[in-house]
Every structure is written in structure tokens, then in C-alpha cells.
Image: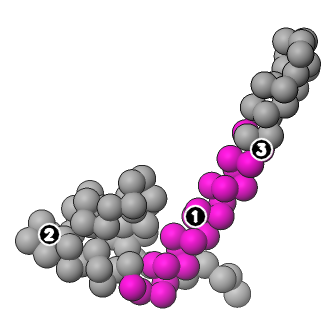
Amino acid sequence: MSNTPVLSAKQARFVQEYLIDGNGAQAALRAGYGAAGAKVTACRLTKDNRIKQAIAAARRAYADELAITRAHVHLCYAATSAEVCTELG
């Protein structure tokens, strides 16, 4: 059984939108929730354990992905020769 929380399509969209800027109300609007209750909806969603887990999992995945990029950039920056960066790909 997967550890990934089961979310509705709209909830999953909220998670993706929330990851853009961390603004819950704007994420709720972009995910298709109503404007009148966007702040309340964002508050409710960000307190939901399934949503919290999905956000945390996505952030971990992004961090893992960026770690490779950071390492590559660091190596290129520290290199005294452009040839080293070229070899890294």
C-alpha cells in the first residue's frame, strides 16, 4: 500500500498551486475554489493531514531534485577551469 495520501483532483491541484508561492488563499483560487471563501478554504485545507503530507512529500521531492543541481552549480563555480564544468554535463 502506498504512503501517498488520496486527494481529490481539486485538493491535489491546491497542493501544486500552494507549492508555487505558499499563499493558501491564492492557491485555493487557482485550484478552482470559490473566491468568497478562499481564505477559509485555504486554512481548512492546510490543516488537513492529507494535504500536509502531500505538501511535505512534494517539498522533499523538490529538495532532492534541487540538491543535484546545487551540487553541480557548486562544482562548476568552484572549478578553476571551464573544462571541468563541460565534463560534468
Residue nearest the observer in this picture, 50 or 47? 47
Quadrant, the C terminus: top right
Three-letter amino acid code at the position of disc 2 = Gly
| Residue bearing the label numbered 1 | 58
Q: CA distance from mark 2 to mark 3?
A: 38 Å
Secondary element type, mark 3 = helix
| Residue bearing the label numbered 3 | 68
Mark 3: few, some, or many residues within 10 Å (few <14, many ≥20)?
few
Where residue 75 sits in the image (x, y, percent)?
84, 31
Q: Residue at x 68, y 82 (%)?
A: 2
| Residue bearing the label numbered 2 | 34
One can see residue 13 in this view: no
* Nearer the camera: disc 3 or disc 1: 3
Q: CA distance from mark 2 to mark 1?
A: 25 Å
User: Magenta region: which residues?
Assistant: 47-69
Q: Residue at x 24, y 66 (%)?
A: 25
Q: Residue at x 89, y 16 (%)?
A: 80
Q: CA distance from mark 3 to mark 1?
A: 16 Å
Q: Are marks 2 and 1 in contact (CB under 8 Å)?
A: no
One can see residue 16 in this view: yes
Q: Residue at x 73, y 39 (%)?
A: 69
Three-letter amino acid code at the position of disc 3 = Ile
